[in-house]
Amino acid sequence: MTKTISDFVEPSDEIQAEDGSISADGLLDEVSLYNLYDERDSPEQDAERILDITYPTETLKAIIQNAVNKLDSSSDLTEGTHVIGGEFGSGKSHIELVVYHLLNSPKLGQKWLNSCGIDVTLPDETRTAALQMFNLEQEYDRLSEAVGDYLGVDEWADDSDLPTVHDIRDTLDGKPTVVLIDEFERWFGMANRSEYKDDNLAFLQNLLEAAGRDDTQLCVFVSLLYESDDVQAITQRTNPFTYDLSSRRDEKIEFILHRLVGERLDAEGISDLAREYTDVYRQNDQIQLDDYHDMQQRIDDFYPFHPAMLTLLMDKYSEQRISSDARGLLKFLTEILKDNFESVNLVLTGDVNVHSYVNRFQYIDSELVGKYTNDYYRVQNADDSFDDHVEELLNITLLYSLARGGESGANKRQMLMGSMRKEMNAHEIIQTFQEKVYGTAWHIHRLNGEYAFDTDENPTARINKKAEDIHKHDAIHRIESLVKDDLFDGHNSVFILDPVNTERDIPDNKNLKIVVSLAAKRNYDDDFKMLTTEAEREWNNTLVLVTPEKRSSIDSNTGIIELARKVVSGEQLKREESTLPADFDDIHEQNFQNLRDRVRDKFGTVHTSTDRGLFPQDLSVSGNADFYSATLEVVRPDSSQLRNEVSEAVENAGESGIQYQYLRNDFYRTMSYTTLTEEGDLQDAIKSLCRDGEIQVGSYFEETPRTIGSDTELVHESFIEEEEGEEPRTITAVGTKTKSVSSGVTSQSASESGSTSAVEEDESGSSGSVSREVSVFECPQCGEELSGSECDNCGFEVSASEVEDGSVTVEGASTEDLLTQLGDETEGGEDSGPNVRPHPPMGTMAERTIPDLIDRVDREIKLDWSIHSVDLVVTGSLGGDDVGQFGLSEEYADSVEIDETFSVEPDEPMRKTDLTNFLMDLVVPENASVELSLKVVKDGES
C-alpha cells in the first residue's frame, strides 16, 4: 500500500480539530499588538499560546539575548535600539509580541527559553509598552504622549516640552523598560499631524539615544516597512541592531513548519523518501541540480512540503503589498496540507489546486488568474475530467507566472520537479504538456525556455482553436500533398494510394510510377493487384509501392493527424487574416516541420513486383534527402540480374530472335521481370551481353553496338551458326541521285529514273557550287536508304576502313562510289554544314499527354544531340479548368476544340533539357493529344 503524509507526520495541535482532522479555523495566522489591551479576551493576550506556536529562529534568539543583556545593569552592552524590517506578513509583529510576553510574564517566559536552549535570565519585573500606532486606545498627535501614556509616565502625556534624553533616563530611574513601536511610519506620515512632524522625530531620536546609554536600562523596538526616509534616518543614528526579515526565508519556513507540523511519526521514512525523490532527479537528464545532497536534505527538512513549492509560494506572497492576503500564507498552507494529507507522500507544486483557491491568487494577479480560469475549462475533457498530469502542469505554469505574466514562467525542470514521482516517466510528462496544455491553453506562451501565462492570446492557441474545425480528410489530404510535394520533391510520377478528396488517376504508360501508401497493416499484394492486373493495365511492371515501415500507419496516427490539422489551420489563417502576431509564422513553420519530421520517420519500405508477389526492401533516407531519388536507388535494377533476365528472354525467343522493341515492352509489361527505372539500364545490359558474346545485336557480335533501334534483332549466341570465316556484308546500290555541294548546305534531289541530272550554277551562284551524280545505297539490315555512313532507321553503320579491308562489299556500284559517299560524310569540313536529320526517322512522336511526351523525349533524345527545329501539334477540347487560360468564360467549357501548331526555329540549336523545359512550360488542355517532330544533329556529328 502506498504511504501518504499521514503515515509520516501528525498535524500540529494548532491546526487539529476535535475529530483529529486538519482545520485552519483555530489557526492564529495574524497577530496585532493592540489586542493586548482589549477588554475582551484575545489570542494575543495568551502568553502560553503565543510562546507555544513560536519557533526560536536564530534571529529571534539574537533579539532576545541582546534585549535581555541590555536590561541587565551588570552587562557591558549599551545598544538598546532594535529595528525590525520587512514587508507585510514577514513576522515583525509576532516577534514584538513574543518579546512582550517574555518580559511581561517572566516565569512562563523563562521556562520557554530554557526549553529552547536560549541561555539568558529574564529580569523579574519589566515595564513594557506595546504600541501599534494605528490602533491606539485614543487619538494622539505626539509620540511622546502615546509612549508616556502606555508606560504610565504622566509628565510625558501633557503638552509640556518634549522629554530630553536625561528626562527619559531620570524618569525610568533604573527600572528595566521595553517600548515596542509598530506601524510608526504610516502614523507619522498622516497629513493631519504634519505640524507635529519635527516633535515626533525629535522624541523618537531622544528615546533611541536614551536606549543607547549604559546608565539607562531601556530597549526600544521599532518595526519598519522602509517607507519613510526621515524615520529611517533617525533610527540609524544610534547604531541599532537591525534585522531584515525579508531576507530570512529559511527562518520563516522553520516558523511555518513549526506551526503546521507536529510529531514526526517516521523520521527514518521521511529521510528515505527524500532520498527516493533525489534519486529520481539524478536519473533524469532533464533535471540537473548543482547539489543533489542539498536537495535531499532540504526535502527532509521541509517535509511535508517540497522546498520548490514552499519557496515559490513564499516568493509570490512576499512580493505583494496587500497585508490581509500576504499574512494568509500560513492559513493557505494549512488548507493545502489538508487537501493532500491522505493522498500524496509529499506536497509538490502541482498539488496546489489553484482552481480551488482562485480567490486567493486573484489578490496577487487578478487579470492573469482570469485567463488561467478560462484555460482551465478549455483543457478539460468533455466529462470535466483531466488527462494525467494536465491539471498539475497547468497549476505549475500559473504559479510561476503570477505577477510576472509574459515575463517569466516555469521551465521543464520546474515542471518535472513539480509533478514527477517515483516510477513516472519524465518524457511522458513533457509530451503531455506539449500536446495537451501548451497550445490548448490559449494564454500560455513560450519564452526563453520557459512557459508562462500571459494576458495576451498565444498564436499557437489560435492555430489550435481553428484546427478543431479541420476535417480529418482535409488533414490527411494535407499529408498526402506533403508526401508528394515535399518528401518526393514534387515529381509528377508519384501518386497516393487511395487518396482522400481526390480521384486516383495513375496513367498507364512506360514511365516508372511510385505509388505511396499512408496506411500500414494492409495486404500490399492485394493493393498491387488492384492497381495492375485487376485494373487491366498494359504496363504493369512500371509501378512500385512505398509504404510506412514497422506496420505503423500515417493516416490513422492521431498525433500526425492533429499536427496536420494545425498546419491546415495555420495556412487558412494566413489566407484569411490580414494581421497576425509577430511570431505566428515561426509557430506555423515549426508545426509544418514537426509534421514533416513525423511523416518522414514513418517511412519506409519499397515493394517491387516479382513472380512470387511483392518484394520489400528498406527505404533508407538520411537527413533531408529526397525520397524520390532514394526510392530510385532502391529500385534500380541489379546489372547482373538484368543481364540474366535479358539473356534468358532472348534465348527463349529461339533462333528467330526478338526485336528490341518487343523485349523492352515485355519488361514494362511482365511483373516477373526486374522493374526498370529508365530504359538506358536495359540498353546497357544488352550492349554488355553483345560485347561479351552472349547475344547478337543486329550485325554486332562480341563488340559494343553504338545504337539500338526499335527494329534491331536480338539473337542468343546459341542460335548463331559458327562459320570458318566471317562473310562480308553487302551494300547494294539501288539508283542514283544528283548531289549539289556548296560552302553552305548540301542539297539533294533524287532522280526517279535513276539517270544523271546535273545541276549547273552560273558565275553568280553562291560559293561556286558544283553538282555530281552519286549512287543511292540500301541498308543491308532494314532496306532503308543509307544516310551517309549509317541508317537512321535501324542504326546500321559502315566505315571506309570496312570497305577497304573487304569486310563490306558493294553490289550495283563500284567500291569507289561507296568510298566517295563515305568521304563526303567524314571529310566535308566546315563547308559541308551540319548533317541535320528528321527525328523520329519516320512519322512523329504522338502521345496523349505532355508528361508522356516529355518521357519519350527523355528516352529517345540523347544529351549531346542538337535540335535545329521543333514542330509540335496540340489537339483537343477545352475543359472547365482550361477555358480561363485562353480568355474564355466557363460557358465555353467542353464546347471549344483546339488545334495549335508550334514551330520553333531557334537561333542557336537546342539541347534536350531546353526542349523538355519548353514542353513543361506549355499551357495544354487537360483533354488533349500531342504530336512532336524534330530535326536534329546526332551525337555531335557535323
Image (cartoon, rainbow, N blue to C red):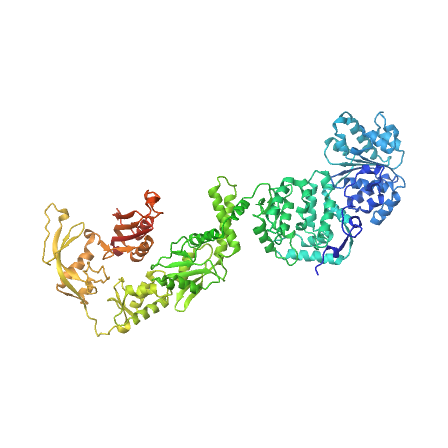
State left or right for residue 689 relative to residue 315. left
Which image quadrant: the C terminus?
A: bottom left
Q: Quadrant of residue 187?
A: top right
Q: Height in image: 507 above or below 194?
A: below
Screen quadrant of the N terminus: bottom right
User: Is 536 placed above or below 466 here?
Assistant: below
Task: Kindly indicate the quadrant of the structure image that contains residue 663.
Answer: bottom left
Question: Which residue occupies the foreground of this view, 445 or 113?
Answer: 445
Residue 520: % across, % down: 48, 61
Q: Is residue 894 shown to the viewer in this render?
A: yes
On the rendered structure, is 752 left or right of 344?
left
- The answer to whether 799 appears left or right of 183 in the picture is left
Q: Position of residue 703 (x, y in %)?
A: 27, 66
Q: Residue at x 21, y 62 (%)?
A: 799
Q: Is residue 289 visible?
A: no
On the picture, is 486 further left or further right than 903?
right
Identify which residue, 775 or 433, lies in the foreground.
433
Q: Position of residue 288 (x, y in %)?
A: 63, 53
